[in-house]
Image (tube, rainbow, N blue to C red):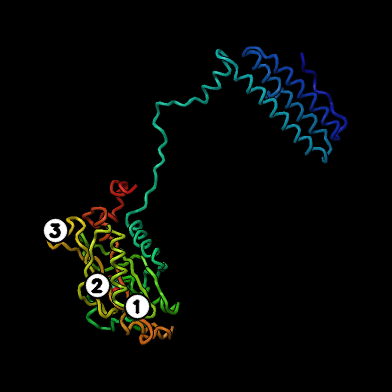
Amino acid sequence: MANEAIPNLTAFDEAALGKAFAALEAQAREAAAVLDGEAAVEAFRLEWLGRKQGRLNEVSGRWLKAAPPEAKKALGVRFNALKAVVEDLLDAALGGGPGDATADAALRAEAIDITLPGTRRLTGAEHPIPRTMNEIVAVFAALGYSVGVGPEVETDYYNFESMNFPPEHPARDTQDTLVVANQERKPLRDRLLLRTHTSPVQMRTMEQQPPPVRIVIPGKVHRNDAADATHSPIFHQVEGLCVDTNITFSDLKGTLDYAMKALFGSSVKTRFFPSFFPFTEPSADVQISCIFCGGKGCRKCKDSGWIELLGCGMVDPAVFAFAAEKQPAYDSRKISGFAFGMGVERIAMMKYGISEIGSFFAGDMRFLGQFA
Ligand code: DAH
């Protein structure tokens, strides 16, 4: 028998510890080398790792307890190393050939029932609205535009007045506004509302930085619209603003024509119709050739071959005048600019063939899962 009784340790210096642990390791290796059959392996396990009478337990009980405090750490390290050696020896012995009952039991304990359904990890998917918003932003980012954001609860000043909607002006009626309650005691310009468009971030941006500006602003907006297939009181827009010296309407047309081709495919054509927005002069509505019928006329484009997609125009000098209160460089005699705003839901509905705007907000996994 290779095993000898655990001796008492009297010296705890490195040399003494080294010798004592080396002797134990040699004994363990010797014993493991001749293990033969499951009973012998189990006996080896009990002999060395047994919780009460195992040799390692004895070592830790006697040597560790007797060791002076300064030697405990070195002893512990050697102890752990020896324990790892013994466990490896045991693992190797358990790995023994077929018919080894201990090994079988260990394997059975670890066995996987491959007939059980697996744990499925659901892959998250980007919601189609932020996804479309990011796509639009990326088109402009590639043109050198930076990205800005602004608050969703906005003041009357930024949402309307600074965008050249004077108090009481009928143009305000085109944006049915949800206002924050109990604001009546404040001056009108400070009253809070849910922003009806992302345009106020044009003003916030200009107040923060002098020209040149090239910025796109994705964000959520609210209007008191009755919900139907194409209207929702919550929706999203991407706003754009470009201000520099000598910005012309052709820059606007070129930029938006490029952007629509990048978003909908290079065969798409654009056309610009006169329109009105208080903050641009002149203003235009942009239509693209119908992406469903290629312009031939179909139900989607009401047989016109064209689909109206966004608003735009040259920044109104009155808007620059508001910006100039904080940044005098917005002097409409020296600079000019264009702006545009598009609805994200409408674009996403066209791109993905979605017919109900409410699907975006209903949280139905059967809808959302299609974007995974
Ligand atoms: N703010 C407009 C709306 O919500 C959209 C828009 C039109 C934005 C023209 C613009 C613009 O910047 O130039 O209806």
Say which label, 2 or 1, has the lower sequence index: 2
As helix, strand or loop, the secondary structure at mark 3 comes to loop
- What type is the residue that disc 1 sits on? Ile
Taking the spot 34% from the left edge, 53% from the top edge, the residue there is 127
Q: Which mark is residue 205?
A: none
For the residue pair 281 and 187, the one nearer the viewer reads as: 281
- How packed is label 2: few (under 14 Cα within 10 Å), some, or many (20 or more)? few
- Residue drawn at 80 percent across, 18 percent down: 4
Q: Quadrant of the N terminus?
A: top right
Disc 3 designates what residue? 296
Residue 7 falls left or right of residue 350? right
Residue 250 in view (yes/no): yes
* Residue 97 sits above or below residue 186 on the image: above
Position of residue 134 measured from the top left corner of the image (x, y, whole percent): 37, 59
Measured Cα–Cα span from mark 2 to mark 1 = 32 Å
Q: Which residue is mark 1?
A: 247
Position in image of residue 22 (x %, y %): 79, 26
Three-letter code for the amino acid on which mark 3 is drawn: Lys
Contact check, label 2 and label 1, Cβ < 8 Å = no
Which residue is the site of mark 2? 176
Q: Secondary structure at mark 2?
A: loop
